Amino acid sequence: MIRERIEALREQMIEKGVQAWYLHGSDPHLSEYMPEHWQTRAFLAGFTGSAGWMAITMEKAALWTDSRYFLQAEEQLQDTGIQLMKARLPETLDVSDWLATQLQAGHSVGTDAQCIPVSLFRQMQNRLEKSNIMLCDTGDLLLPFWNQRPQLPSTEVFDHAVKYAGESRSEKISKIRLELQKNQCDLQILTALDDIAWTFNLRGSDVPFNPVFVSYALINQSESILFIQTGKVPAGLKQQLQQDGITLKEYNDIFSAVSSITEGSRIWLDPDRTNQTIRNAVPDSCTITEGISIPCQLKALKNATEVACLQQAMKKDGVALLEFWHWISNALGHEPLTEYDVVTQLNHFRKKQADFRGDSFYPIVGYREHGAVVHIQVSKENALPLAPEGILLIDSGGHYLDGTTDTTRTIALGKPSPQQKSDFTLALKGVIALTEAVFPEHTRGYHLDILARKALWEHGQNYGHGTGHGVGFFLNVHEGPMSIRMEFNDQTIKAGMVLSNEPAFYREGEYGIRTENMMVCVEKMQTQWGRFLGFETLTVFPIDPKMIETSLLSQSEIDWINRYHRMVYDELSPRINEHLKAFLAEKTREI
């Protein structure tokens, strides 16, 4: 099936006169999670990871993905004829360099410009031109042979109340206009779905795991236009939006609206969050200023209402996870269980909590060797059976009206080995070091990343993914523009930003270990040497004491764990019954 689709694509390439085709594997909004209509990578290659891009020539096909998905990709690409390219490894060519080795001068590479960011299109164009190879827009070449392609979703959008958001949509739009004015720009085109949902205080269910809706927006000093399938907006909400000065237009009207922008307008455009087709539609007379989307910058700084709501959401999530841990501790060994049962039970316990609106991503559940597959998605078919031995990695989260959660714990199902405890504790030392960090403002995430890895590095160990990502507020669980990782990111860590803290370690074929808390950046002190920031932990859930090797910890690290567990007990115990309190007391005991 996959081989037949690749051949059908090659027929389309011949018709378009291109010798290669690049599939970015995204949608027009450059989303991590997409409606089925745009899940082109899964359709063409059978690879279901959330990150991956492809290049197809007349003789070869290759797919690039990062370390989170190496094992998954090897399995899913088997017998497809598609070569796995392990992205970001020194020996792996990037897609443009690979294409340059496969093609000749004068050849052309096609792509669907509606599903590739401006920045990448420009980068590839510049690199390929050095080899006298042209990059051109062919449109979507999958259309002619993707039979029964899913339609765009038509689910209704709904209002996200100010009591959660902390600011009205009018206040947010005013902030965007002020930033445009500061940057001497007239308007911004919004294409990222979470930017739009945040700006208009709206949410939807068009995309798996992210409470967003398919749309574009255009904001200038006098108008706010939301481009959406207008039938998705209930009559009462439509009236409310109009009262707030927001004009509704049909989704596909965005392209004519952009091409009709007043001559000489100054446009703020985010090259990483805007697709090339939108850029091509901008009139030549307009001036473009490139920078990070203004709503992306604003929404990263959580207001006091959002932080207070999120603290409540984390407590609800902590109760759900505690009920789950109690359930599996009692069921294991008494009834047949698999990793997939863990997936379903996590959702079951979260559903019991008020204002729950779904999982924030597909739970990552890895028992034994599956724990080393960083972003594994188990199904009924491939789930491993559980036994009262070994260790289990669980990375999961929920959406609540009052916040989005993301928590990882590694729990012992039996007696952990000395090596498992050592690996776990070295990664945990990284969690503590990053949590306790105090740093001057203007510090970047890559400056802090070493704190999370230092203990592992000292033992010759490491992990391949980032340490921390931004988390949206009842929005995308992965949110920019900041991060904590080894790779360069020029965005500073600011007070109000909510990030994950997830050092890890993996032994391929054996097990995986990761501990993840969410934390908010806060001001710690102001001195004559400047303003200093730090973090406060938001996650309220025990760290398995059975996994901790205390001999590897300093006294201050032991004190941190004990303080954290006292906080967890104090916050969760009033919310649970006496039976569960005893279980919680055991899991938060002093070490």
Image (cartoon, rainbow, N blue to C red):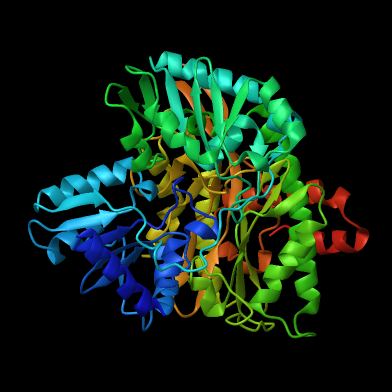
Q: Position of residue 475 (x, y in %)?
A: 61, 43
Displayed quadrant of residue 238:
top right
- In the image, farthest residue toward the right: 578
- Percent of width and height locating residue 233: 68, 38
Q: Is residue 43 above or below residue 483?
A: below
Of 240 and 463, the residue lying toward us: 240
Pick the residue in front: 517 or 83.
83
Residue at image point 68% right, 33% down = 306
Q: Quadrant of the N terminus?
A: bottom left
Quadrant the C terminus occupies: bottom right
Residue 162 location, quadrant? top right
Whole-percent x, y for residue 448 in the image: 43, 42
In this figure, what is the number of numbered marks? 0
452 versus 426 height, above or below: above
The answer to whether residue 244 is seen in the rendering is yes
Image point 66% across, 82% down: which residue?
Answer: 386
- Residue shown at 38%/37% (left/top)? 278
Give the side of residue 433 with respect to residue 183, left or right: right
Q: Is residue 65 left or right of residue 15?
A: right
